[in-house]
Amino acid sequence: MEENTAKKESKIKTYLHRYFIDAMSAMAQGLFASLLIGTIISTLGTQLNIPLLDEIGGYAKAAAGPAMAVAIGYALKASPLVLFSLVAVGGAANTLGGAGGPLAVLILAIVAAELGRLVSKKTKLDIIVTPLVTIFSGCALAYLFAPYIGSAASSVGNLIMWATKQQPFLMGILVSVIVGMALTLPISSAAICSVLGLTGLAGGAAVAGCCAQMIGFAVISFRDNGWGGFFAQGIGTSMLQVSNIIKNPRIWIAPTLASAITGPIATCLFGLQMNGSPISSGMGTCGLVGQIGVYTGWVADVASGAKPAITAMDWIGLVLICFILPVLFSLLFDFILRKLNWVKPGDMKIDV
């Protein structure tokens, strides 16, 4: 009995890792390679007055649904026919899901990929049967469920953004800490923010939390990792510290406390908002995508008349919240932790 229970628990863990971590992380990469990079290219085209760049960016953004679905299929190790068929499923789910399209793509691409896997290479007419099952099941489910999935995701995201406006201090802390920790864990903070459509003040708090984790770990681990580790974490990912966190969870205290401070500073003092692409809210300083997202939001707001101009205070707030304050607070808390002997030399050593 105990052996069967252990096997069931092992299977559950495997499926959770497969669908929640692997698929979601891959979906974020698909979003990055389409919507996010397309937004950056379009912004460059607008700012430099190069229409061709704006057009290219538009093509990239239009491919977001298919890109996410194919990325998910790749993470699930789908066969080639299933993988290529997911292009149509992703397009349908993202379009019909509306603002919550990414969540619809995540769920329906997984279902379609698994249904396609059931028939893949099982018949002599595989080249017809596999795409037919994958596309028909995925698109049919998209028509039936994508609008509701999208609405549910949008409702949750809107609730978080509404709560952040009502209670910017408390929610600034919660959003900053939770999204920042998600960025360091092997789950995708970018995908979470995209699925929920997290923008506005809540998006600003998310940016603050992610930056605190990345810049925080980069500076407090500098004596262990040098400049290579600094850049790998500062503009790469703080996920490199996961194995060290497992060994000594106390190393996570300093950047997490830093995020608990920079979050409400972002929402209450500077009113930092992410009005660019929601995925940028969960990227932090990775390739400076979070900062580029904030800037593209400023540009869009100025163009629409929602914001009169980009001010010096905007830039000061962005630099303080994303770079300077994470350094100062993380070093302060790390100093205390080392004095308590909770953190020791070598605890944050990574392979770079």
Image: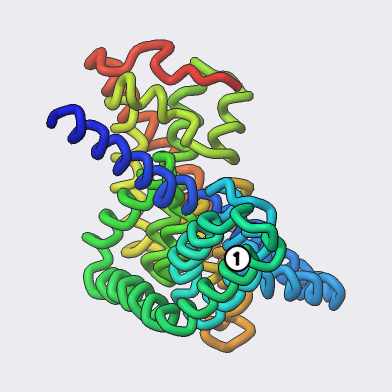
How many discs appear?
1
Q: Is residue 184 above or below residue 313?
A: above
* Horizontal and vertical percent position of residue 67: 64, 62
Q: Residues within 10 Å of mark 1 (few under 14, many from 20)?
A: many
Residue at the image point whose x is 64% and y is 84% from the top: 303
Image quadrant occupied by the N terminus: top left
Residue at the image point whose x is 37% and y is 40% from the top: 14
Here the colouring is rainbow
Asked whether the viewer can see residue 256, the reply is yes
Q: Which residue is mark 1?
A: 295
Q: Nearer the viewer, residue 92 or 218?
A: 92
Q: Quadrant of residue 230?
A: top right
* Horizontal and vertical percent position of residue 175: 32, 57
Return the residue found at the far left.
1
Please indicate whether residue 218 sits to the left or right of residue 13 in the image.
Answer: right
Image quadrant occupied by the C terminus: top right
Residue at the image point whose x is 62% and y is 63% from the top: 130
* Horizontal and vertical percent position of residue 24: 47, 53
Asked whether the viewer can see residue 313, the reply is no
Q: Nearer the viewer, residue 302 or 75?
A: 75
Q: Quadrant of residue 3?
A: top left
Q: Nearer the viewer, residue 313 or 110?
A: 110
* Horizontal and vertical percent position of residue 286: 58, 46
Return the residue found at the far bottom.
305
Secondary structure state at the residue bearing disc 1: helix
Give the amino acid at mark 1: Tyr
Residue at the image point whose x is 29% and y is 32% from the top: 253
Q: Quadrant of residue 305?
A: bottom right
Please indicate whether residue 326 sits to the left or right of residue 173 in the image.
Answer: right
Q: Is residue 18 above or below residue 45?
A: above
